[in-house]
Structures are given as structure tokens and as C-alpha cells.
């Protein structure tokens, strides 16, 4: 039986002091309004580099499949590690801001919902901007190995919309609603990993396909319907945005929704094909 040693008052005070200093540094530098865009975007790009290296190290040491891949396949393997990490981060932040935070709640009386922002919401968007910049750079560098023109269009639209929302503070609620769609990314990446590892006929591959189908339906189809309905209900607030913001609120979600429906059709077709083979 292990005995827990009591922590001295001096140690507790020291820990609280360090915590206060850390929080102060975050507020003063990372979340200081004038430098948020720069620190956030830089943090996003740096996180991509770290995610790439970590994925490479872990895969080299624990995956037998990784050693058999070609150079391009290894790059895509590592790149999908980055997108998975970003997806988990931005989905968590988006769900928090859209459904739990008071910032964009209709109960809040802090001004029009289309003009609300906070240091934290700006920082999270900046990290996402850094990711899209880094990922676009890799797509262009290895084009079309990491994705064709549809990926370029998707990333460019996302980058422009998220960057504008971060810099202007406009339409951040709708930006986060769209970013919730990143919740499907880990499943898509897992599907690629399983396929590359020769597990296309496994039960895990089938279950993952079913999860992708339902998550895509909710996050990339139904949620966009809710977004357009929210815009309709708050149109008197939306119409007061800058013309650029108005354009992005209406055009970007519409284009992405169309692309999502096209991909959803392919997912449904692929799932039917997989189920038919197993029967």
C-alpha cells in the first residue's frame, strides 16, 4: 500500500505561483489582441511540423506497414497524422463555441451574434489558418499526390473564410459551425491507414465505414442545413456584415455543402459496395 505524502503549504503556493505566471504569459503574449493572429498562425504551422515528426517517429517504431511504404506514401501517412491532430483540436474548440460557450448564445446581450469574438476564439481560428497554410503548401509541393483540385479548392475556401473571420471578428459562429465538419477527418484518415495496411476486408474497416457515413451525414449535411436555418433566423444581424463577410457567409458554406453532398454520394456508394462484398 502506497502512502501519499502530504504536500507542504510552501509547495502548494509555489505551484499556484507558477500557474498564475503561466496564465499571465498566455494572456499577455499568446492572447494579446494585437499579436493573436501572428502567434496563432505560427503556432498552427509549428504544430503541423511537430505533428509530422511525431507521426513519423511513432510509425517508424510501431508500424510494420510504414517500413514497406514508398517515399510519397510515407509523406501522405505523416500528413494524415497532422490533419487528424488538427481535426481533433478544431472540432473540440468548435463544439465548445457553438454549443456550450456563452459567447455566441442567443441569451447573451453583448451585441450582434455576427460580430462577437474573443481572444480565445481568434486564437483557435489562427491555429486552423496555420494548418491550412501548411497543408496547402504540401499539396502544391507534391501535387497531385496528396489531393487533386477539389482538395485545393476546399482548402483555399476554408483558408480565406477562416482568416477573414479571425482578422475581422465577423461571422465566427458560422465559421465554427463549418469547422465542426472536421470531425469526419479522423475516420477518413483511419480508412486510408487501414486500406494501406491491407485491412480493407477487416471488420474494423467496415465499422469505420459505417461511422464515417453517419458522422458525415450529421456533421457535413444536417449541420449545414442548421447553419443555413440559423442564418435565416438571424438575417437582420447577418445583413449588417461587411460585403466581403456576407459573400463568405453565403458562398463558402454553399460551395462546401455541395462538395460534401457529392462526397457523401461516393461514401454511400462505397459503403454499399463493401456490405455487398461481405454478404
Image: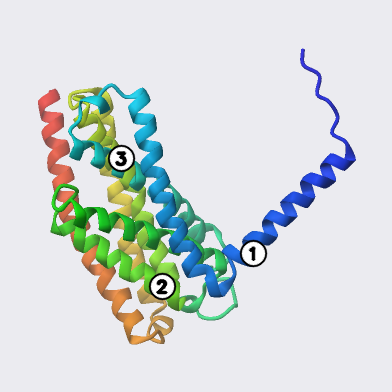
- Look at the numbered disc 3 and give the secondary structure of its residue: helix
Q: Is residue 257 shown to the viewer in this render?
A: no
For label 1, the residue is: 27
Q: Position of residue 23 (x, y in %)?
A: 68, 57
Indicate whether 82 appears above or below 179: above
Can you say whether 191 is above or below 267 in the image? above
Picture quarter with the N terminus? top right
Helix, strand or loop at label 1? It is helix
Give above or below for 177 relative to 138: below
Is the C terminus in the top left, top right, bottom left or bottom right quadrant?
top left
Q: Return the residue at label 2.
A: 165
Is residue 130 or residue 261 the one in the foreground? 130
Upstream in sequence: badge 3 or badge 1: 1
Chain-order first, disc 2 or disc 3: 3
Expressed as whole percent of the image width and height from the top left, the position of residue 67 reads 25, 25
**Which residue position holds label 3?**
78
20 or 54, nearer to the observer: 54
Instruction: Say if mark 3 contacts mark 1, CB within 8 Å.
Output: no
Compared across the picture, whether 153 is left or right of 105 comes to left
Question: What's the distance in space between the residues labelled 2 and 1, CA to CA?
Answer: 21 Å
Instruction: State the residue in front, 276 or 126.
Output: 126
Amino acid at each position: 500500500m502506497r502512502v501519499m505524502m502530504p504536500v507542504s503549504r510552501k509547495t502548494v503556493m509555489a505551484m499556484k505561483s507558477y500557474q498564475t505566471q503561466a496564465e499571465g504569459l498566455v494572456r499577455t503574449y499568446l492572447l494579446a489582441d494585437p499579436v493573436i493572429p501572428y502567434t496563432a498562425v505560427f503556432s498552427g504551422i509549428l504544430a503541423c511540423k511537430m505533428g509530422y515528426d511525431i507521426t513519423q517517429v511513432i510509425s517508424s517504431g510501431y508500424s510494420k506497414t510504414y517500413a514497406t511504404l514508398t517515399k510519397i506514401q510515407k509523406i501522405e501517412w505523416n500528413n494524415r497524422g497532422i490533419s487528424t491532430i488538427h481535426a481533433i483540436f478544431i472540432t473540440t474548440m468548435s463544439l465548445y463555441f457553438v454549443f456550450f460557450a456563452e459567447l455566441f448564445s442567443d441569451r447573451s446581450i453583448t451585441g450582434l451574434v455576427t460580430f462577437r469574438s474573443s481572444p480565445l476564439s481568434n486564437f483557435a481560428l489562427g491555429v486552423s489558418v496555420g494548418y491550412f497554410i501548411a497543408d496547402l503548401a504540401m499539396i502544391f509541393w507534391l501535387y497531385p499526390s496528396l489531393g487533386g483540385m477539389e482538395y485545393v479548392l476546399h482548402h483555399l475556401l476554408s483558408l480565406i473564410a477562416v482568416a477573414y473571420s479571425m482578422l475581422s471578428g465577423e461571422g465566427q459562429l458560422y465559421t465554427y459551425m463549418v469547422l465542426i465538419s472536421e470531425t469526419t477527418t479522423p475516420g477518413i484518415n483511419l480508412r486510408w491507414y487501414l486500406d494501406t495496411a491491407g485491412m480493407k476486408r477487416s471488420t474494423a474497416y467496415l465499422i469505420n465505414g459505417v461511422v464515417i457515413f453517419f458522422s458525415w451525414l450529421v456533421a457535413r449535411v444536417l449541420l449545414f442545413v442548421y447553419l443555413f436555418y440559423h442564418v435565416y433566423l438571424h438575417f437582420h444581424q447577418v445583413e449588417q456584415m461587411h460585403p466581403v463577410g456576407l459573400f463568405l457567409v453565403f458562398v463558402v458554406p454553399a460551395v462546401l455543402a455541395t462538395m460534401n453532398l457529392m462526397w457523401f454520394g461516393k461514401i454511400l456508394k462505397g459503403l454499399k459496395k463493401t456490405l455487398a462484398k461481405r454478404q
